[in-house]
Amino acid sequence: MKKRILLSIISGLAAVAAFGPFDKGFVAWAVLVPFLFALEGAGTRRSFLLGWAWGFFFFLGTVYWVVHSMYFYGGVSLAAGTGVMLLLASYLAVFVGLFALGFKVTERSGPLVRLLFLPSLWVVLEYLRGALFTGFPWVLMGYSQVAYLPLIQIADITGVWGVSFWVVMINTAIYLAWRGPARGRGRVHVAATALLATVLVLGYGVVRTDKVDREVAGWRRLRVGVVQGNIEQSLKWNPSLKLETVNLYRRLSTKAKEDGAEFIVFPETAMPFYLAYDREMRDLVSRIPVETGAYLLTGAPHYTYDRSAGGVNLLNSAYLIDPSGLVSGRYDKVHLVPFGEYVPLKRLLFFARKLTAGAGDFVPGRGTFPLEFINNGSREGIGVLICYEAIFPGMAASFMNNGASLLVNITNDAWFGRTSAPYQHFDKAILRAVENRVFLVRSANTGISALVDPVGRVISRTQLLSREVLVGEVGLKRGKTTFFSRHTLFFPCTNALFSAIIIFSSLKTRRFV
């Protein structure tokens, strides 16, 4: 058993290298193989334990940044922050433990059944991880492939989960082909099926990339300026620095205009005050689009009065200000960060508190409604993903279905410092562009800011923890939305049905002990 656990732990730790900032995506193609061998012949309880061990050490290496955020900015002791991170890793590892149980259930099934079942089950568990208890779809296996453009193009049909399916399928094929009888047909069938799947994925990627590039050539263009202010989190909310902050962004906006920007984007809460109510600061911010002649999208907190509760509702918002200096729209963040913007189960977790500044919990906005602006006489819609919202595939798809022609992700990743989190967060935004075949503009307070095209190419990007201005041209989407945008849950639901059938059949024909 010790050798099995060691093999699982090594496999889980090695998988970390497939994700940012290491970006060794090729590691993911075989990193599960040692883990699958460790599961072979293990009992039910041991299988779950081995799966949990793989997941625990994998998530230990990919969500360790939680400690950094809680310790440096949440006022939480190092010991308490480490405890929270370990609990999170333990919870996330349960999903890998369930995958290991699925491996055990189908141990007597044919190789082709397992070749399709194991990646299907993995996809279902990734989806559940991103949906249960508000969801945490961090480091899904598909994100490991963002550097390999042909492999991620299937995301416009399947979402990121389709890429995960392919990765786990390749791992499963290597395992099954390796362990199969030397003269058995199963080994050949498995290898042929995996090879065919790979050819189809790559072929689709090459053909689709060419087609999308030709479509994009006919879209209306917009020159966008992305401002990365790089303001230290510990200074960001200092009231005495409000004027200095506005003046900084004003200077950077002037630079963006000099490079021809028609639309300027600031990060999440770039204006650290209530823009709608602070008249003096609002007037100064409104001068920026007037002076530059460009639309301005900026993050800022907002609040509304709640008469029934006798208090206020706090909102994490994005304001769109037109070249005349008037606010033409506001989007309020819908998917809030647990413990970052609100404390879930407050009565049960009475001892917990938020990491963000502010007196109370934030409340979700009314929905995914694009902000509208005029470009060369044409009305366009912007889908604004505020910070955490970019990691949820359904959020971006919802904006596209509501008429967005451009996705903008504004975020403040200063919480993460120089950890792996800003890199991993950026990788998720790239997949949102591919899934929806739309340009994505990203403005992050401390980085990474970028312009991404509809096939996932990073047109330009900033460095982490630097003060920069990016200016580049993007296209405004035309034509119908992608299959994934219209049918976001089709792939995970199809895999859930298939997995359920296989599990039921396996349990019916054998005693599961």
Image (cartoon, helix red, strand yellow):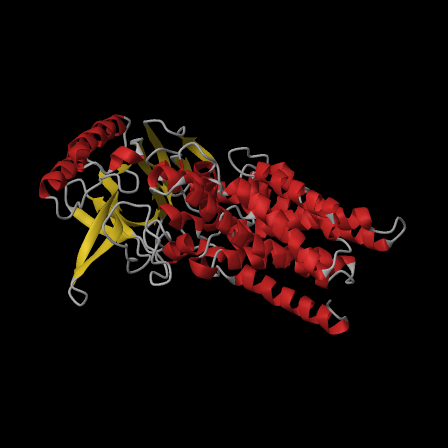
Query: Taking 511 as reference, is 75 above or below it?
Result: above
Left or right relative to 133: residue 314:
left
Residue 247 in view (yes/no): yes
| Residue at x 18%, y 30% (from the top left corner) | 244
Q: Is residue 195 visible?
A: no
Q: How many marks?
A: 0
In this view, the residue farthest toward the bottom is 508
Residue at 78% of width from left, 56% of height from top? 41
Query: Along the horizontal axis of the image, is 336 left or right of 21?
Result: left
Observer-nearest of 491 and 507: 507
Q: Is residue 470 left or right of residue 292?
A: right
Image quarter where the C terminus lies is: bottom right
At which x and y percent is residue 44?
70, 61
Residue at the farthest left position = 280
- Front residue of 372/306: it is 306
Where is residue 367? Give x, y as percent.
Answer: 31, 59
Horizontal relation, residue 473 to residue 297: left or right: right
Q: Position of residue 203 (x, y in %)?
A: 63, 45
- At x 87% / y 51%, what residue is drawn? 181
Picture coordinates of residue 349 (x, y %)?
37, 58
> Residue 211 or 25: which is nearer the viewer?
25
